[in-house]
Amino acid sequence: MIPNDSYQIISYEQLITAVENDMQESDIKVAASFLIDALNDWPTFNLFEPKELIIELRNDVRGKLNLENLKLHLNELDFGKENNSHKAESLAALIELFDLDNKMELEALIHKITLHYLQK
């Protein structure tokens, strides 16, 4: 399943630049930093873009990419399998994004980060 095209999603390069240039401490900046961590921790080689991560998660996680399902998926990971510790690190970072709004889905949270930084 592909990401919802109604959401504008920031690129990895734009995200890095935006966080580096953001001199204010805010919940959005903290969430954006966690998104960067999640992208860097995800074990798929050459995966950098938030859209690519969403696609991978839609293949891995049952149901919507909401807080409850991401926590459930994290708890169900088999750490005996290769790369699952990296997935766990990435999922833990993504779960932190829900401090912005625990009722939204992940894609909507990333869209919120996108709007914040691309409007500057």
Image (cartoon, rainbow, N blue to C red):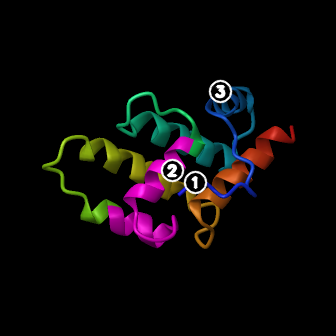
Question: The C terminus appears in which quarter of the rendering?
Answer: top right
Q: Residue at x 71, y 53 (%)?
A: 111
Q: Which of marks 1 and 3 is in front?
A: 1
Residue 97 in the image: state x and y as whole percent.
56, 55
Nearer the observer, 110 or 5: 5
Residue contact at pointers 2 and 3, CB within 8 angstroms: no
Q: Is residue 37 above or below residue 69?
A: above
Q: Is residue 78 left or right of residue 91?
A: left
Nearer the observer, 111 or 7: 7
> Identity of the amino acid at label 2?
Ile
Q: Residue at x 69, y 26 (%)?
A: 17
Span of residues in magenta = 52-73
Secondary structure found at label 2: helix
Residue 114's label in the rendered image is: none
Give the mark nearer the N terminus: 1 vs 3: 1
The residue that label 1 is drawn on is: 2
How far apart marks 1 and 3 lie (CA) works out to 21 Å
Residue contact at pointers 1 and 2, CB within 8 angstroms: yes
> Identity of the amino acid at label 3?
Glu
> Identity of the amino acid at label 1?
Ile
Residue 94 in the image: state x and y as whole percent.
49, 52
**Residue 68 is covered by the magenta coloring:** yes
- Name of the residue lying farthest toward the front: 1
Q: Is residue 6 above or below residue 14?
A: below
Residue 47 in the image: state x and y as whole percent.
47, 33
- Name of the residue lying farthest toward the right: 119
Residue 13's label in the rendered image is: 3
Secondary structure found at label 3: helix
The residue that label 2 is drawn on is: 55
